[in-house]
Structures are given as structure tokens and as C-alpha cells.
Image (spheres, helix red, strand yellow):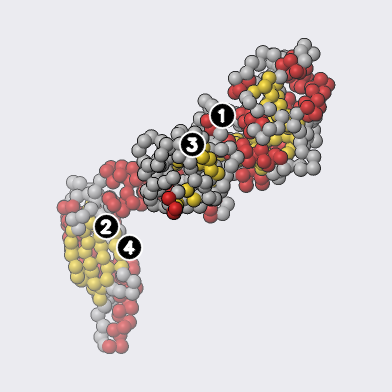
Amino acid sequence: MDLLAYLRAVRKNWWIVVLAALLGAGAGVVLVKTTQPRYASTVSFFASTPSTGAGTSFQADQYAQARVASYVKLLSSDKLAELVLARAGLQNSMTASDITQKISGSADLNTVLLTATAVDASPEHSLKLAQAVAAEFGPMITQLEAQSSKNGSAVILNVTSGPTLNPIPVTPRRNLDIGLCLGIGLLLGLFFAVLREVLDTSIRTVVALREATGRPVLGSVVFDGTAKSSPIVSEATTHSLRAESMRQLRTSLQFVDVDSPPKVVVVTSSVAGEGKSSTAANLAIIVAETGRRVLLMDADLRRPRVADYLGLERSVGLTDVLAGRVQFAEVVQPWGESELFVLTCGSIPPNPSELLGSRNMITLMADAGRDFDLVLIDTPPLLPVTDAAVVSAHADGVLLVVRQGKTSKGQLAAALNALDDIEARVLGTVLNMVPPKGPDGRSRYEGYSYKNDIKGDSVRASIVELSPTNGPVEDESAFHVEETPGVESEVTEPSVDQSGGSGHLDLAEEVPTPVAGSAEPLLVEAPVEPPDSLPPEITEDTGGGENDGRYSDSQHDMLRLTLPDAVRD
């Protein structure tokens, strides 16, 4: 994974990072609330060694530094603990072993300074312990040094600072503890976010799909929240993200093999729930828009969906044709105003695999390939049953649908192996249900934006209609944008020319002067640029009556341009 992949992983799993950080901060708060405050009192000592001359002064200082390191250990000794306990008079509240845990020491490097610290939950006890250390530690050291030296104590400890009580508890350190817990939680969140991405074997990007299969990715279909209730592309959604994705898939399929284009194509997937049936149906609709004769055949004889999606009768269909009970021409159903024909599944048979592998099915596929420009066959998933493999063996190619974030690499590899075993021709794959804002999304495509209600973006349009008027045109002239399928072009900045008393609207090309009282509207080929490129004096209206500065794509299909100057005839 590169740096960009790590950032995407964190962005996708941001909730893990936030949750871990909040849990860490919460743990810090609980720790602070449940930890008993502890107070510290300190006392400082200066270690000195008597010297008889200038020559021995340096040696005495070095000797004292060496001894100080040993004295730090003696601060936690049992002997000092007993002396401190007796001096402080705390026999009723603690023992000598408790005192060894409460007293510690430290020495600055290359110095003869020694600091003793007494910590206790009671500030009074902490101060008493430090006072007892100040009184007992020096004499104890003098006694120990005198026992090991014939000339008396070689080192003398003098109190230089303290004992002093710090009124602020040393534990818990509220801000520091909460900050540390927050930081630990944040790091753990980042770790688990990246780990989740690394362990995720599902296909999430076009690049990952191409690398996993070694086959071309013919298209990526953008996820549409309305697809569950409206799985089929209709006139109302002809310029939706999903429709544009299907058009891209249509174009890619046309150029798979220019010399010998596939005519009978099986649409299948690895497992259920990947959107193969809706992909097959929408692809058939989009291809039929171009005027080609398309046959959509529902060969999913286990869980048929095509008839329900298209609102057709499925009681008689493919199975009846294969059984010889009816003729193909008697049950094939036209759909819509285009050259799209649908052969529904018919009655559910007890032996789908055998029926789909029959000679009648092979003959039907061959005949349909001759009579139609394109035949799309929706089949069951490859892994649960063998139906798709049986049909794929006699088709011109297979289109494998992969659901983004659900299909695993293992499932995809198993599906491809099943197709390779029968030597089926895999035309390519389709990544389905891609997030619009992801790396493979198409919320913005070639400078255009496809949204239901877009602020600050462009609208796909190709026709501008100038409404005629009886007499002079008023100061506000209305233009509306009709969205024309398949037309994409750009517009120069509009302007009004009133020279010579007759006006016209300068767009991509000169617009003829409108005739007053004309019965027919004046149509001009001219799409619209994004709002930020329009002159400031032109505003956009969604058709609601008030200028709200918005483009509307599918809700109103209207763009109103308010011109500051009159368009005179």
C-alpha cells in the first residue's frame, strides 16, 4: 500500500479512528476520576568530603559524586524506613515496608546534589516523611561511613533545600493523562483502520479489480440510493449517474472486438446480490436507445428478476420455449418505445441446469444471435450453481458483474476458474455499486456534474428555447434548457447585442433574431457552462419563480437566464 492508499483507508474507516480516540479520552477521564490524588514533598542534600589541600580537593569531589549514587539506593532501605517511621510517629497508619515504597531519591549527573522525595495520599503524611528523612538520613550516612573508615566519616550530607510540600498532586496529572490516553486511542484507531483495510479482501476499486482478474474492466456503475425502489433507468433518470455509467459500459462493450463484436453475451456474477439482473436490464435499455435490436433473456431460472424489474408477465417464457410448448415469437415481449424485446423466464423448472444445457437452448441462442443485434442473457451466479457456466459455454462472451466492497478476491478467482474450465470467453468485468465520491465515482465527469440539485456546477443541456413574445420583449426574457440525451458540448459566455435595434443572443454561434408574435419558439443549439463562468449579471433559476442561484437537472429541467438588458426586435 502506498501513502495514498493509507489515507484512503483512514478516510473510509474514519469512524474507527474517531471511536478509538473517544474511547481513549473516556478511559483517561475515568482514570483521572478513579485515581486517588498523591502528594509529594522533597528535600535536597549536598554531599561534601573534607580535604586537606588543593591537590586533594578534586579527588574529594570525585569521591563524593561516586558515593552519592550509592546514597540514592539507601533512601529506600529498611534501616532508613525504620528510623523515619519512628521520627514521624506514623506507626498507626503505615509500616516500615510501606515507607520504602513511599520514599525515593535521585541525583543529578556529575554533581554532589541528592534529592529525596516522599509521596503519600495525605499531604500531611508526605511532609512528615520528608522532614523525618531530612533529620535521619544525614546522621545515618555519617554512621555508615564512620564504620568503614578509621578516620571517621569521609562524606557529610547537609540539607540545602526543604523539606517542601507540593500542594498540587503529582498523580493523577489530569491534562497529561487524558491527553496521553487520547493519543493512544488515536494511534490504535489509525492502526485498526489500516489493518481493517489490509485484511479486507473485497474488491473496492477498478485498479484492484483489474489486478485481481487480469481482465479489462468495461465499466463501473455508480451506486444509486433509489435503485432498490427503481432499479431500471427511466426517462426521469436518463441523465443520472447510473445511466451515464451504463452508457460508458455500452461504449466499452461495443469496442471489445471491433472486427467480430459479441452478439450473445451472458451477464452473471460470482455470488448473489451483486446486481447482475439490474445491470443486464439497464444495459439492454441503454443499448436499445441507439436504435439497435436488443433481446434481453432471463435465464435465471432459480430467482428470476427481469420480469419484475420491467413490469412484464413471466408465467410463460424461456422454459416454455425450450420445452417446445410455445414458439419464441409468441412469448417474446417488446418493452418501451425502442427496439428492446424481453424473453422472461417462464415457469420455474425442477431441472434448470439440464434445461439450459439442452440442444434447444443452444439453437435458441444461435437463432437469437442472427435475429438481434445484441442478446443479453441474465443467468444465476457462478459459484452456487452451474447454470451460468452451462450457458456461457455456448455464448460469444461473458460479462462478470462484481459488487464493490462485497465480492471477495477469493470468490472472484473461483468464478473465473469456473469460466476458464469451460473455456468461456470473458469479455470483461463491471464494478457495480461504486460510491459516487470514491476514486472510481462519477459525480464529476468531463467537467459536467450529474446530481438532482447542483449548486455551483454545470448542467448537461443542448437546446435553448427563446420564448416568443407579441411585441417588444420585456426586460426579463426567459430561456429554458431542454436536456437532450447524448448531446454534450460547451457554451461561450452569453451576451446581448442590441445594435441596430434588433437583438440576438450570442452563444456558441450566432442566434437568429426572434420574430415578434411568432407562433413557434426559436430553437438554438447551445449547452450551458458552469455558473462560475457565466457573466455576473446573469442569474440562474430552477423554475420556482424566484432566482435562487441553482441549476436543476432532473427536478425541474429548467434554467432561467435573466438578462439585464432588453432583447429588442
Q: Classify residue 400 by image quadrant.
A: top right
Write down the residue under mark 4. Answer: 73
- Numbered disc in front, either 1 or 4: 1
Query: What's the CA distance linking mark 3 and mark 4?
Result: 107 Å
- Name the kind of residue labelled 1 in the image: Ser
- Report the front residue among 553 and 117: 553
Query: What's the CA distance linking mark 2 and mark 3?
Result: 103 Å
- Identity of the residue drawn at 18% across and 61% down: 164
Query: What's the CA distance linking mark 1 and mark 4?
Result: 85 Å
Percent across and percent down for residue 276 are 64, 30
Percent across and percent down for residue 321 are 76, 16
In the displayed structure, 265 sits above or below 171; it is above
Percent across and percent down for residue 42 are 22, 61
Write down the residue under mark 2. Answer: 103
Write down the residue under mark 1. Answer: 234
- Identity of the residue drawn at 50% across and 52% down: 492
- Identity of the residue drawn at 30% across and 44% down: 29
- Report the front residue among 419 and 316: 316
Write down the residue under mark 3. Answer: 518
Work out whether mark 2 precedes mark 1 in sequence or the reverse, and give the earlier one. 2
